Image (cartoon, rainbow, N blue to C red):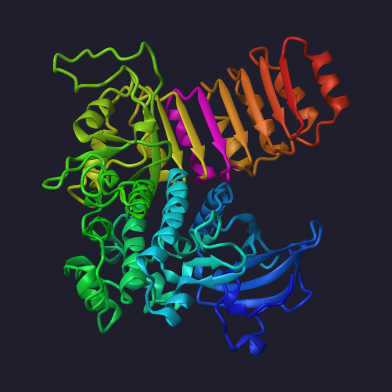
Amino acid sequence: MPESDPETLHGAESDDSESSDSSIYKPNHMLGGRYRVISVLGKGGMGIVYRVEQVFLEKELALKTIDKKLLSDLTLRRFQHEARATFAVDHPNIVSVHDYGILDDQTPFLAMELVFGKTLADVLKTKTRLSVEEAIPLFVQVCFGLAHAHKTGIVHRDIKPSNIMLIDGVEQGTEGSIKILDFGIAKFTQHEAGEIQALTKTGEIFGSPLYMSPEQCAGTRVDLRSDVYSLGCVLYEALTGTPPFAGETALATMLMHQSETVLPLKEASLGEKFPPELEKIVQVMLAKKPEERYQSLGVAANDLAALARGEASAISVVGAARKGTSSSKPEPTVTLTKTSLVLQMLGIAVVSAVVSSLITNGLQFESKEAPPDLSSSLIKLADNMFPAPTAKYVLGKPEQLRVDLKEIDDHTSTEMTIKDAREQLRNPNLRQVRLRDSVISKGVLEFLTQYPQLEGVDFMDCALSNEDLGILAKLPIARMSVIASNFNDVGAEQISKVSTMDTIKASSTALTDKGVKHFAKLKKLRQLKIENTDVSAKTIALLCQNPSFKKVFLARCTKITAEDQRWLMNTFPSVNFDFKDE
């Protein structure tokens, strides 16, 4: 692959200080034992982008390091979670992430697809604005790429012209001719300090505010509709040659996003004519209230494509484009998906929680109050939007229905209050709680003890206070699942105090053979599922001596050889073994 001007490469921000900065890795330096540095592509406030070769695959990639000074222990865990999620996103309009991790010097990195081209910011510097015919095919692809990311639960949060690239060698308007850059990078530094402070840290205070949503400017909760607004700002600038709002200072610009009315495209472009349907599409994208914008960029893409085809009647614009809303007063809604319920417990930490319960006998409404009109006894999560009264009714019956919810959002306020969230979770019959992407502090564990019938806890992508897990012994916990979390031997020792434990699942944790041995103290333990853990056959044999122990599932536990497997099965015929080595 020939050398190119750094400004045409993915993620590059030219910096003349390269040669004098001792923190920059030099050519031929090996990173992580598999990436050979070829050159520096650019340096920005977030970190440095290198052109590297994956020596085992002989493949060139762009490797972005994140300045570790911007990351605390908490935001480092969030980096790992976001990188893992972004790693799973595969779409022709998104720069793919091939690898992520922490280098030997504790510097976080992302290894990404290396792409060549010009950013939209570069194009607008020379061309000022795009014609409608040029803009629509470009933005249709960006809409589809973002819509795909949103379906996987990822919000970009930093959509701007410099993060949209027109790829060299691919005919514009064809699939993959546009790539979205830097998914999730901005989010890593914004968890603790807030949007404005994070922008100040990264030196981008005079860039991103031009494209920030009103809720970002206000420092309140952000979801996929913030990306809708930001993309609307970029589309507006591409069509008119000027962003919708540009104050004398960053703060003035952010205030304008929250309160000023945007000029029509014709007026902002000094007289250029635009289809009225395009004016409406942009207006919907730039609505101040999130509920008045497109609720899916897939719908926006379809509207833009219909406009390009000349099918004005197929453009949803104000009506169906805003699912669950109307042009007058938006209907309160609750968003139900498969990730997390954002709430703050006891004022200690922001916790993303998924609250659910076991299905018993289906829906059996015992209250004399007429239930909301539900189309079936099982709410379909794919439907995504539900009226708030329905959601609150369901939450009031958690012992009878399994519900996964991402966030409760009445759209009348930016976020539920702590009191409201705790009230929704106060049902004493709650049987199971899932906590995702959460900080599980001692306070959170104590909070759970108010549910006397709680039988199951699931932790995924969580930062656990391992030394306090013994608090769960106050509850009749029978099932525990810990996935991609920092659960370790100390936590295992604490869990051994939960005498009611029946089933334990641990995957991709910090648990070792020493910790698994503590499970032998659990006399009621019947099932154990362990993945990616260095447990030995000797320790598994110790657990099998417990008369109640009936089933063990081991996957990718490399210490246990095929010979060990045969020995275990012959020695303990009453135990059902399941070994998965792939």
Q: Taking the image as drawn, is residue 348 in sight?
A: no
Task: Return the x and y of residue 413 as percentages of the image width and height.
Answer: 19, 50
Q: Position of residue 500 (x, y in %)?
A: 51, 21
Looking at the image, residue 571 lies above or below residue 266: above
- The C terminus lies in which quarter of the figure? top right
Q: Nearer the viewer, residue 282 or 578?
A: 282
| Residue farthest toward the left in the current orientation of the protein | 328
Image quadrant in which the N terminus is located: bottom right
Check if residue 11 falls in the magenta segment: no
Q: Residues in magenta? A: 462-487
| Observer-nearest of 520 and 230 | 230
Q: State the residue at coordinates (58%, 17%).
A: 524
Residue 321 in percent (x, y) is at 27, 45
Of residues 156 and 141, the one drawn nearer to the viewer in this rendering: 141
Q: Is residue 473 magenta?
A: yes
Residue 579 visible in the displayed image: yes
Query: Is residue 130 shown left or right of residue 59?
Result: left
Q: Residue at x 38, y 66 (%)?
A: 193
Residue 154 image position (x, y, % from top left): 45, 50
Name of the residue lying farthest toward the front? 310
Choose between 476 and 376: the one closer to the eye. 376
Work out whether 119 lies above or below 427: below
Q: How many marks?
A: 0
Residue positioned most to the right: 563
Q: Is residue 179 above or below residue 359?
A: below
Residue at 72 percent of width and 14 percent of height: 575
Question: Relative to residue 238, is residue 408 drawn left or right?
Answer: left
Q: Quadrant of residue 246?
A: bottom left
